[in-house]
Amino acid sequence: MSKKIEHVRAEVLAWYHEHGRHELPWRQTTDPYLILVSELMLQQTQVARVIPKYQTFITEFPTVKELAEAPLGDVLRLWQGLGYNRRAKYLHQAACIIHDTKMEWPRTVKELQQLPGVGPYTAAAICAFAYNQPAELVETNVRQVVIHHFFAGQKTVTEQAVQKRAQQLLPRDKARTWYAALMDYGSYLKQQYGNNTNKIKGYTKQSPFKDSNRSIRGAILRSLTDGQKTKQRLQTELAPIEPVRIATQLQALQAEGLVTKERRVWRLP
């Protein structure tokens, strides 16, 4: 197996050297703040959509200080088009914690997970890309590579088996380059051969976005980027969405702190 590991590792790195997306803006930095911005933006969002948003965002908020001092509403306005607006709120909260407490950026997976919205994957990504630490980082493109090279003939495979093989593949001193290579190579394999991650036991597809509560929440926030509005105005603008669904999502957004209400008017924080 060691020869197989070495062969696959060499193949991935050679492919990345020739075809990798070395120009991606978040690959030009080791700043943990900028890595966090990119990772939260990239969650369930295509790279092509993230690039211009990332560039605009870091131009407006180049450091933790600028982000922490900005109103959440301004952050949400810049976030529009990415979806999953909780991510913007978590990013803002994390910046406030770092800035207000004057703390140093955490350098371990465990410590990073104390920040809002930073789970095991995001924490591991920061450790790998900011600090070049050999953290365990398994996402869809990494799974794609592992399954293609080690489990192609199997109908099903466990997540534990994929993670074990991913750890065996990791060059301990090249985590930053290795994970960038895996993500690009995995994306290439998916385009060439289709998605093979449905072989993983327990695999479930993401629910459709159209007509979902997520889509209504996004529509409300997009509308409020133009300015404050009454519920009646929102219902008119968002027709034919049912008014009761709009009202329900307004209440949910308010509970999460993503919108505020003053008398009869709704607005971004």
Image: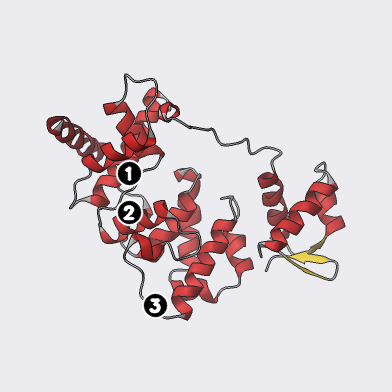
Residue at (46%, 49%) from the top-left corner?
Answer: 42
Residue at (38%, 36%) from the top-left corner?
Answer: 159
Q: 10 Å neighbourhood of mark 2: few (<14), some, or many (≥20)?
A: some
Quarter that holds the N terminus: top left
Please name whichever residue, 167 or 213, is drawn nearer the observer in this view of the structure.
Answer: 167
Residues at marks 1 and 2 touching, judged by CB atoms closer than 8 Å:
yes
Q: 10 Å neighbourhood of mark 1: few (<14), some, or many (≥20)?
A: some
Instruction: State the residue position of label 3.
Output: 103
Cα separation between marks 2 and 3: 25 Å
Q: Measured along the vertical axis of the image, is residue 201 above or below residue 82?
A: above
Instruction: State the residue position of label 2.
Output: 27
Describe residue 70's horizontal placement relative to residue 25 as left or right: right
Which-is-in-front pick, marks 3 and 1?
3
Instruction: State the residue position of label 1.
Output: 21
Describe residue 250's horizontal placement relative to residue 149 as left or right: right
Image coordinates of residue 120 in percent, x first then y, are 41, 54
Which-is-in-front pick, marks 2 and 3?
3
Residue at (13%, 34%) from the top-left corner?
Answer: 2
